[in-house]
Image (cartoon, rainbow, N blue to C red):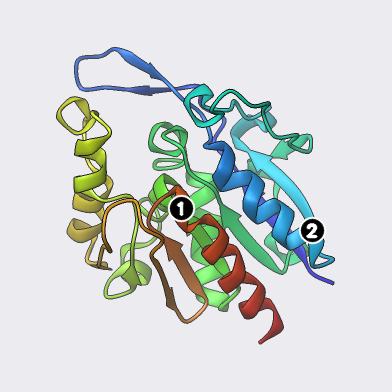
């Protein structure tokens, strides 16, 4: 069975363009659904965050329920990718604050893309591609939370930057599906999902990649 590294944000806010801090973290569904799918398939999961801090759940994602139980996190800076068979990045706006600029995460992404190790990212988790080596992202087919969805969520006008715009500027071949509908793109071993509703399909694609 495979060992999968879940790289999660350690941020509890997203700094907006006016300097205010929007409370956030990881989106519950984007962690819980893939975690349940891959562990039900017999695979093991370890969680890593910048600094090894416990991930903060975005309370807006709980819909009155309890937060998922997340395994204790290890420090992302100390991770050796040789010990894992695949990497997964859940979203929430937290990654826009830290993983979008994290050097240790960028090294993991570079290594996974270079080695052809399955790399799956969903929603704002796709922001982890931004600090990677540009040549590894240029021309790759990806999706992520769209400008349309960010506008509908009420944060586009306040955002210091938008994920769709940054991916396009980086040279990625970005494509969105209908807002809030499941949409997943698999470009070889690089798997990206557009929004929270894409979480299950991203996990399914990751499981397929692990069987390849």
Query: What's the residue at 21%, 30% (across, down)?
Result: 160
Determine whether 30 is above or below 59 in the image: below
N-terminal of the pair, mark 1 or mark 2, is: 2
The residue that mark 2 highlights is 39
* Residue 161 horizontal/vertical position (percent): 21, 37
Q: Along the horizontal axis of the image, is 34 left or right of 2?
A: left
Query: What's the residue at 59%, 35% (across, down)?
Result: 50
Mark 1, Cα crowd under 10 Å, few <14 / some 14-19 / many 20+, is many
**Residue pushed farthest front?**
64
Instruction: Give the CA distance from mark 1 to mark 2.
Output: 19 Å
Query: What's the residue at 23%, 29% (across, down)?
Result: 154
* Residue 74 horizontal/vertical position (percent): 74, 38
SS state under label 1: helix
Q: Along the horizontal axis of the image, is 74 left or right of 13?
A: right
* Residue 159 horizontal/vertical position (percent): 22, 30
Q: Say which quadrant the C terminus sits in.
A: bottom right
**Residue pushed farthest bottom?**
212
The residue that mark 1 highlights is 197
Q: Say which quadrant the N terminus sits in.
A: bottom right
Disc sitting over residue 137 in the figure: none
Residue nearest the viewer, comparing 36 with 108: 36
1 or 2: mark nearer the eye: 1
């Amino acid at each position: 069975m495979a060992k999968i590294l879940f790289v999660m944000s350690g941020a509890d806010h997203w700094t907006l363009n006016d300097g205010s801090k929007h409370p956030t973290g990881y989106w519950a569904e984007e962690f819980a659904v893939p975690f349940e799918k891959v562990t039900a398939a017999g695979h093991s999961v370890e969680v890593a965050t910048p600094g090894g801090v416990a991930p903060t759940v975005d309370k807006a994602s709980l819909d009155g329920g309890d937060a998922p139980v997340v395994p204790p996190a290890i420090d992302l800076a100390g991770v050796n990718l040789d010990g894992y068979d695949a990497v997964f990045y859940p979203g929430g706006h937290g990654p826009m604050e830290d993983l979008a600029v994290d050097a240790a995460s960028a090294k993991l992404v570079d290594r996974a893309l270079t080695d052809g190790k399955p790399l799956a990212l969903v929603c704002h988790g796709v922001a982890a591609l931004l600090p990677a080596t540009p040549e590894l992202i240029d021309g790759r087919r990806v999706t992520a939370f769209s400008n349309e969805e960010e506008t509908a969520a009420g944060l586009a006008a306040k955002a210091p930057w938008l994920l769709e715009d940054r991916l396009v500027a980086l040279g990625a071949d970005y494509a969105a599906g209908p807002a809030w509908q499941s949409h997943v793109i698999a470009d070889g071993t690089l798997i990206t999902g557009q929004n929270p509703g894409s979480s299950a399909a991203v996990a399914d694609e990751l499981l397929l990649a692990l069987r390849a």
